[in-house]
Image (cartoon, rainbow, N blue to C red):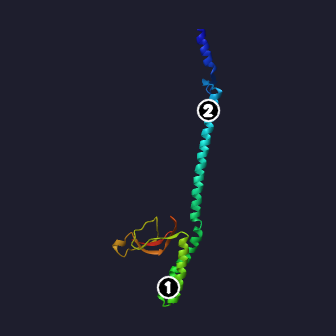
Amino acid sequence: MTTENTEFDQELDDVTLETNANGEQLIVEELSVEEQLAQDLAKEKDKFLRLFAEFENYKKRTSKERIDLFKTANQEVLLAMLPVLDDFDRAIVEINKSDDEVLLKGVELIHEKLKSTLVSKGLEQVEVRAGDAFNADFAEAITQIPAPSDKLKGKIVDVIEKGYKLGDKIIRFPKVVIGN
């Protein structure tokens, strides 16, 4: 019986009794110094890995944001230039009505130079034509009119203003008339 008590006492040396909030006694094992250090090391290692993963995610996110910023950095300037491009389109239509070939050629040259400069900066025209099916994701309907024919019902009858996109993002939706 003495040996049993001695073994039991040794087991109790590794165990501590604690009282919880309800007054119940709980058995808590005390860890050796090596075990405690191993647990602390595991906790710190876990904390380090989480911090490292969070930092990697931060780097990826900021890199993506920077690329997006470079893609759309000149968006405001391009938006400001679109009315000028529209004015050139209208001017060419009106000059075509006259017989002045020299004036038409000069305006067309300036128009093409402006257009090519804007295209080199990433501007693209949104392709929408009369007769296409209307899609609210790519065009803005400004009005509906009675369809001239049955096959134009629910489709685009006329394009009032061209739309443009910068990369994959539409910066100005085309304004269209829909057949009803």
Which residue corresponds to the image point at 61% horizontal and 39% vertical from the top-left?
Answer: 45
Q: Is residue 159 left or right of residue 44?
A: left
Front residue of this view, candidates 118 and 161: 118
Occupied quadrant, residue 34: top right
Which residue corresponds to the image point at 61% horizontal and 48% vertical from the top-left?
Answer: 55
Near mark 2 (Cα within 10 A), the count class, few <14, some 14-19 or many ≥20, is few
Instruction: Find the residue positioned furthest to the left.
Output: 150
Which residue corresponds to the image point at 34% horizontal and 72% vertical from the top-left?
Answer: 151
Q: Which amino acid type is marked by label 1? A: Glu
Can the viewer see residue 67 in this picture? yes
- In the image, is residue 144 above or below residue 103? above
- Residue 35 position within the rendered picture, expressed as x and y whole percent measured from the top left: 62, 29
Q: Which amino acid type is marked by label 2? A: Gln
Instruction: Find the residue positioned furthest to the right.
Output: 33
What residue is shown with label 2?
39
Closer to us: mark 2 or mark 1?
2
Front residue of this view, candidates 47 and 97: 47
- In the image, is residue 55 above or below residue 135? above
